[in-house]
Image: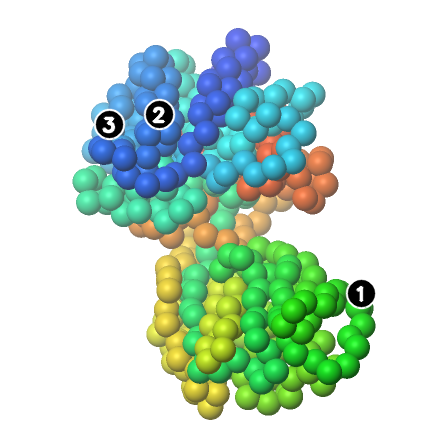
Amino acid sequence: MNINEAAKAYFEREDVRQSAINDLAEIIAIPSVAGERDGIYPYGRVCAQALDKAAELATKYGFTVENHDYHCMSVLYGDSETEIGMVCHLDVVPAGDDWSVEPYALTVNENLLMGRGTHDDKGPFIQSLYTMRFFKESGIKLPYTIRLILGSDEEVGSSDLEYFVTVRKPPMFSFTPDSEFPVCIGEKGILTVEVEFPSLPEGVDALRGGTVSNAVPGKAFAIVKADKELENTESITVHKVEAGYRIEATGKAAHAAMPESGVNAINLLCEYLVGNGIVENSGIVPIISASTGEYLGKTLGINAENDDFGYLTCVGSVIKGDPGKTVQCYNIRYLPETPYQEIVSAIERAVAPCGGKVTVTSQSDGYFVSADDDKIKALTEACESVLGIECKPYTMGGGTYARWLPNTVAFGSAIESERHYLGDERGGPHQRDEYISEKEFFGGMEIYSRALSNLAGIL
Ligand SMILES: [Zn+2]
């Protein structure tokens, strides 16, 4: 029996499958949302508990564990100096309301394993651990050490990996199971800026929109004075208030990495205010209205595209306007070939005529690897042979650990055809009723085993 057949047989064993589900249940039960430092725990006690639980499982299966001061942890198999990394995170985003099952308890619902973190990214931790178990229990020696790195701060800032590279040398190559199959060979750079304008449109007393910097705002409102009756429209609701009117716009929220499906409420609001003669289309209104009415960055003079990534995206997200000052935030996903300073300069030129000042609030570089790289081919082959479909490497606007650790790509463990059993609003990472399907869970283990065995062949 070759390694691939052995992996397939191992992950079909009922005892192995049940044990993996039990282990997933144990780690899901810990509500490890990253928080403030608490004594020796950099992201709070509950994140440390998740690392301790992972260490307990890894030790039980005979692996060596290194705790990097509760920033992150390594689980090791092998004793070669050369290392291949698998990088997962055990922190989760808050569950939020309106789940149909208990978020912090594993529910097995036919072929779906449900609970916060099943997909992002505790399920992939179990997949990685079981991939290591397969090699160890089958007595297969690899020409490298597998280093499974488990972080605790992926959802907030990835400072866990910044710490890791100060205490350990990064593996010669790593993949992070925190996205979709097949291989993600590139992520756009991410830049968040705030533009402060020295005014609020005349006639407006307050202007607000959006809640987070990395999403197309689904809601926005303005408090205005108006001397005529104002009508509701499909997307606008008008309320009479003491100061005049409160005008609320409802668009459609969307992640800033995929703004195509969103409708920006700030733009709807601006158009209504201008269309009803409440504000003049002058001063800062045209630039705010236009820059939130598109997502290609044309208004700010930063639009760009190439064959590998498609186009740059620019989302006008949170806006906060009070008398004498309006601050508009932009979340920009840019092509890694462009230095971000060039983008900042272009925005400065575009907003200067309105007195706008630009502040960079966060920035991280993207990455790009050629699809012809041997290691990428090794991962792609694993995916194609297990899934039985063509698996062309892709690029994306989303960000993973891959941008924080050298020589790392995102790889799995979502399978597109398994992603929509609960519709578009439920079941995904960060959504209610988050799940990983059994096909994704066990199929992913087989893909990772095969990928690591392919890598052994080319090192
Ligand atoms: Zn994640």
How crowded is the residue under tag 2: few (<14 C-alpha within 10 Å), some, or many (20+)? some
Q: Nearer the viewer, residue 323 or 55?
A: 323
Element assignment for label 2: helix
Q: In this orientation, does residue 278 appear?
A: yes
Residue plotted at (61% across, 21% down): 107
Badge 3: residue crowd in 10 Å (few <14, some 14–19, many ≥20): few
Amino acid type at mark 1? Glu
Pointer 1 with pointer 2, Cβ within 8 A: no
Identify residue for label 2: 49
Which mark identifies residue 333?
Answer: none
Quickly name the residue at label 3. 66
Residue 44, placed above or below residue 370 = above
Residue at 64 percent across and 32 percent down: it is 99
* CA gap, disc 1 and disc 3: 57 Å
Q: Position of residue 384 (x, y in %)?
A: 58, 38
Instruction: Please indicate whether residue 221 sits to the left or right of residue 334 in the image.
Output: right
Vertically, is 137 above or below 114? above
The three-letter amino acid code for the residue at tag 2 is: Gln
**For this view, does 6 lie left or right of residue 391?**
left
Residue corresponding to mark 1: 234
Cα–Cα span, label 2 and label 3: 15 Å
Distance between the alpha carbons at the discs numbered 1 and 2 = 48 Å
Q: Is 224 positioned to the left or the right of 193 in the image?
A: right
Mark 1 or mark 3, which has the lower sequence index? Answer: 3
Which sits in the foreground, 316 or 97?
97
Which numbered disc, 2 or 3, marks the residue closer to the eye? 2
- At x 53%, y 80%, the residue is 200
The earlier-in-sequence mark between 2 and 3 is 2
Which of these two is toward me, 192 or 239?
A: 239
